[in-house]
Image: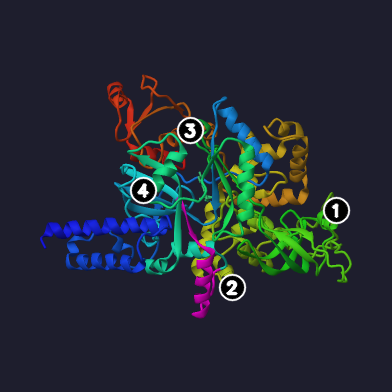
Amino acid sequence: MTADTVREEIEALRREIRRHDVLYYVEARPEISDGAYDRLFERLRALEEAHPQLVTPDSPTQRVGAEPRDDLPTVRHTAPMLSLDSTQDPEEVRRFDERVRRAVEGEEVEYLLEPKLDGVSIELVYVEGRLDRAVTRGNGWEGEGVTENVRTIPSVPLRLFDEGPPIPELLAVRGEVLMSLSAFETLNQSLMEEGEEPYANPRNATSGAVRQLDSSVTARRPLECLAYDILEVRGASFRKDRECVDALRGWGFRIPERVQAVRSVEEILEYHASFHRKRDELDYEIDGIVVKVDDLDQRTDLGSTSRHPRWALAFKFEPRQEVTRIDRIAVQVGRTGVLTPVALLRPVEVGGVTVSRATLHNREELERRDVREGDLVRIQRAGDVIPQVVEVVPEPDRERPDPFRMPERCPNCDAPVETSGPFTLCPNRFGCTAQLKGRIVHFASRNGLDIEGLGSETAALLVERELVTEPADLFELRVEELLPLPGLARKSAENLVSAIEARRSTELRRFLFGLGIPDVGVAVARDLALHFRSLDVLRAADEGELEAVRGIGPKMAERIVDFFAEPRTAGAIDRLVGKMSELFVADEGEERGPLEGRTFVFTGTLESMTRSRAKRLVESAGARVTSAVSGETDVVVAGPGAGAKLGKAEELGVQVLDEEGFLELLAEVAVDP
Ligand code: IVH
């Protein structure tokens, strides 16, 4: 055989195998027997073995081949992977529809409906039709590079099917990696037979498999991938989402079943109901449906918030509920002295998570629902919030103990409690160590002084060993005192002391947040800092002066005044201030935005984000964006394909940034791309 005929045969075999892969894995209608498929595959493998120079990474033989890794790299997404706004309430769906219609001003609206797959979402990037990388969602901007693992998933095309639509230069697809329930059960069975721990649910199993360091392990997991969104495409254009779906199908992706176009809320409700009925019959987990505006221009008009697009909505099913028994009711004391009753449960799986505690909120809620120790209760987990007790399951034949009473004394410090509305409070602000622990954790938290290494465990130890009796004491801690604490090696002790030391100079707003003033969260703390600009001025302010601050009403003003007037609080603050070298207010400009007063023009394409995102970012930092370059323009950001605007900028001597320069600028002004 000549080199050319070998090459031709290899190409023909790959093409044939890819076609059968799509038929088998994507469309579930194989045309040949497994034996016939294996023979094609073996023939290809033999030819490649004899001619290794002809092996390419997109060959069907190359799904597994990488060496195990030490860690997963962090990789930036082509375009941000936003999440979906979600609801369970049909009324919210109506309001969503109304908002959409208002925004497109009377144009016709069509929605595309899909099941909401409960798996692991992933970005697949194809360059010139070849799978270049696969990235987990991560924080939405960047995720973990899991290319080698995802290559092993048979329904992920390594190369776009070229008998479909033309192959774009660049294609970033969003999809969901899943494990079917039956495959999951088989996997767990065999894990248990091998003496290994089974997975709690298909999503955990999927997530573990996708994030493997050794892709040969991933290859043994029965994963599937369904594609449902085009994040970015260069070299093709679409006007409707349904065209995207068709193109994805044509390129060889599996897409969710029953994608449907509708025009009314009624049809959305129907679709939702029909999937809900089928939910338990499906071989994979879905947690609702997704409603998406079909027209892509309308999507652009609708835009996105920083977290989710305004053109889509997840219409979820009610959360998974489970029934379990309450072993005991415990009472927790928080930072502000509020006592919270907590049900300690017989551990139970709820929608895939083991739950062993559920909040009972407060005295009134507890009474209203008449929850007692030993009761059988229905609990639910809504999203990632603390599990809730929905109701007591009646057991007519069971003798119940007396109703649970909130304690009359603080379970932590034994001080007599007080009641305030539905709440029960421990008034021993300064003597109750549970409150002190909470205050230390809050003081050191991310929005407070942001002291690394000072979480709840360390705070608890510091308080229990009486190394810290008030926040000011933190600044007196010495490494030697910390060494005896369990789990604190010298290195961590040194790090903690220097992390605290570094915070002697702190932004006023962080300090104010950290004090834990009633009602003062991040936003109010910032407003107070910007308004008063000094702690002394704020402490001297009366109610009237406080009410002059945006967002502060009479009630809040009174609470703030009371807080600073309390003698022991005042003393603790004085001592704390004595430890600080500086409480500074970030420059005024920061409030209005670091790019205030500057005018930007964008031209050409950007690699790391869409132009509309870039525009929003600089606008959120206070800049203006215009379309034409003029004497008013301060910065032109030019990517590949930049047009006449670039020439004009050069002519006028306007600063020109390429994408790297632009990203640097964003980093300088602390705007997260
Ligand atoms: S569309 C901008 N369609 O649900 C968001 N998402 O928070 C575009 N998901 O992690 C996503 N099935 O990965 C879309 N048919 C579907 C989906 C889907 C599952 C995931 C998505 C995200 C989560 C929503």
Residue 97: % across, % down: 61, 35
- Tell me, yes or no, whether the two marked residues, 3 and 2, touch with CB atoms within 8 Å: no
* Residue at the spot of label 1: 419
Q: Is residue 259 placed above or below 413 in the rendered structure?
A: above
Element class at badge 4? helix
**Which mark is in front, 1 or 3?**
3
* Residue at the spot of label 4: 251
Query: Which circle's residue, 4 or 3, is located before the other in the chain?
Result: 4
- Tell me, yes or no, whether the two marked residues, 4 and 3, touch with CB atoms within 8 Å: no
Q: Is residue 101 magenta?
A: no
Q: Nearer the viewer, residue 254 or 473?
A: 254
Residue 654: % across, % down: 33, 25
Residue 533: % across, % down: 61, 36
Ligand 1 is within 8 Å of the C-beta of the residue at disc 2: no
Dot 2 amino acid type: Pro
- Is any atom of residue 577 visible in this view? no
- Tell me, yes or no, whether the two marked residues, 1 and 3, touch with CB atoms within 8 Å: no
Element class at badge 3? helix
Query: Which circle's residue, 4 or 2, is located before the other in the chain?
Result: 4
Dot 3 amino acid type: Thr
Q: Quadrant of residue 34?
A: bottom left
* Residue at the spot of label 2: 486
Q: In the image, is 432 to the left or to the right of 241?
A: right
Crowd tier of the residue under label 3, counting other residues whose Cα lies within 10 Å: few below 14, some 14–19, many 20 or above: few
**Which mark is in front, 3 or 2?**
3
